[in-house]
Image (spheres, rainbow, N blue to C red):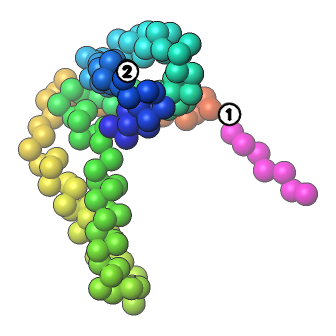
Amino acid sequence: MHKIRNVLDKVPEAVRDVVKAHLVAVRDAPDYALGKQLAEEVIRRFEKDYPSAMKSFRDDLEASLNHLKLPPAHRRSVRTTNTVERSFEEERRRAKVIPKFRTERECLKLVFAILWRASERWRGVRFTDIERRQLKRYREEKAAERESAPTETATVA
């Protein structure tokens, strides 16, 4: 939703509902290929009238579509940033009471508590054999992408 809001901030109020419907259709596509196709259609349709909005949409398109490569039951949990946002909120709340951590252990306890809370919503998610195979394939694709990516070499001045 954050990406959708960022794109919608760049279009006039009068057309936001129309553009939003298209962006949500991309986000909720049944699979990656269709999501990519719908995204390209949205970009073609609105690029002329709203170039900055479509540039913003295009810039993060791959990251925005990655959740479509996962099993459908897991997509909503993966595509949201609620876990990250919750951790920031929790840190701010606790920092008001204790402005700094006295020990590393205190910091680790906070991190563990936040991650534990986030994991609670995953407890009801069950992985079928098909979903396990899909996740394995996805991990293999990501590993292949990392291996084929050019490595940066540091130069010493």
From the image, tell me which residue sits under label 1.
Answer: 150
From the image, tell me which residue sits under label 2.
Answer: 15
Q: Residue at x 58, y 33 (%)?
A: 147
Characterize the local packing of mark 1: few (<14), some (14-19) or many (20 or more) Cα atoms within 10 angstroms. few
* Residue 19 picture location, percent across and down: 37, 20
Q: Main secondary structure of the magenta part?
A: loop
| Magenta stretch in the rendered image | 151-157
As drawn, 115 above or below 40: below
Q: Residue at x 14, y 55 (%)?
A: 120
* Residue 25 picture location, percent across and down: 29, 19
Q: Is 119 displayed left or right of 54 in the figure? A: left
Kindly report which numbered mark, 1 or 2, lies closer to the viewer in this rendering. 2
Decide if residue 94 is in sight here: yes
The three-letter amino acid code for the residue at tag 1 is Pro
Q: Quadrant of the N terminus?
A: top left
* Residue 151 picture location, percent across and down: 69, 39
SS for tag 2?
helix
Decide if residue 40 is in sight here: no
* Residue 112 picture location, percent across and down: 27, 68
As drawn, 120 above or below 106: above
Characterize the local packing of mark 2: few (<14), some (14-19) or many (20 or more) Cα atoms within 10 angstroms. few
- Answer with the quarter of the image where residue 109 lies: bottom left
